[in-house]
Image (cartoon, rainbow, N blue to C red):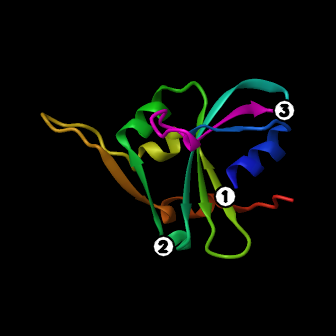
Amino acid sequence: LSLEYEKHRTGADPKWVALDSNSDGYDVLSRLDMGDSRRLVIEVKTSTQGLAGYFHVSRNEWEVAEDALFHVFHLWDVSSETPRLAVLNPDEVREHAPTDGGMGSWQSVRIPFAAFGETFRTVALS
């Protein structure tokens, strides 16, 4: 869904980098928009449970999100025939991400789709 959405949005074919390896810390490499070819990295999360679902962000995915010049999360609600998408920047996700404390460090966080319920929009991909 994100590949099709990005092609429609930018007019260019995005690259599915996670198809070969998940070590890059993101799923799709796209561009900012039709007129700006700067790199946009995208982490894709999907729920078949709608807003009742959760998504997980690994420490590596979060560090990439924080370090990338342009990064977004695509949250897909595919619980019905018509997919809905929320496009979030790291600042919008940050309030749900943990921070390290003392000698401890986090490795993964589970965030509810419902935290971004008002952000989801129906997407026509044809």
| Tag 2: amino acid | Ala
| Tag 3: amino acid | Met
Residue under circle 2?
Answer: 52
Are the residues tagged 2 and 1 within 8 Å (C-beta)? no
| Tag 1: amino acid | Leu
Are the residues tagged 1 and 3 within 8 Å (C-beta)? no
Q: Is residue 50 left or right of residue 62?
A: right
Pick out the residue farthest to the front. 20
Q: Looking at the picture, does residue 6 appear above or below residue 30?
A: below
**SS state under label 2:** helix
Question: For residue 125, which quarter of the picture?
Answer: bottom right
Examine the structure image and report whether residue 56 is included in the region drawn in magenta.
no
Residue at screen point 47% across, 31% down: 64
Which of disc 3 and disc 1 is earlier in sequence? Answer: 3
- Image coordinates of residue 117 in percent, x first then y, are 57, 64
Which of disc 3 and disc 2 is earlier in sequence? Answer: 3
Q: Looking at the picture, does residue 123 appear above or below residue 65?
A: below
Category of crowding for the residue at label 2, using alpha-carbon neighbours closer than 10 angstroms: few (below 14), some (14–19), many (at least 20): some
How far, Cα to Cα, is label 1 from label 3? 20 Å
Which of disc 1 and disc 2 is earlier in sequence? Answer: 2
Q: Which mark is residue 34?
A: 3
Residue under circle 1?
Answer: 85
Identify the image quadrant of the N terminus. Answer: bottom right
Examine the structure image and report whether residue 25 is included in the region drawn in magenta.
yes
Pick out the residue farthest to the bottom. 80
Tell me where the magenta segment starts and ends, as one range: 18-33
Residue at screen point 53% across, 70% down: 51
Q: Is residue 16 left or right of residue 105?
A: right
Residue at screen point 82% across, 61% down: 124
**SS state under label 3:** loop
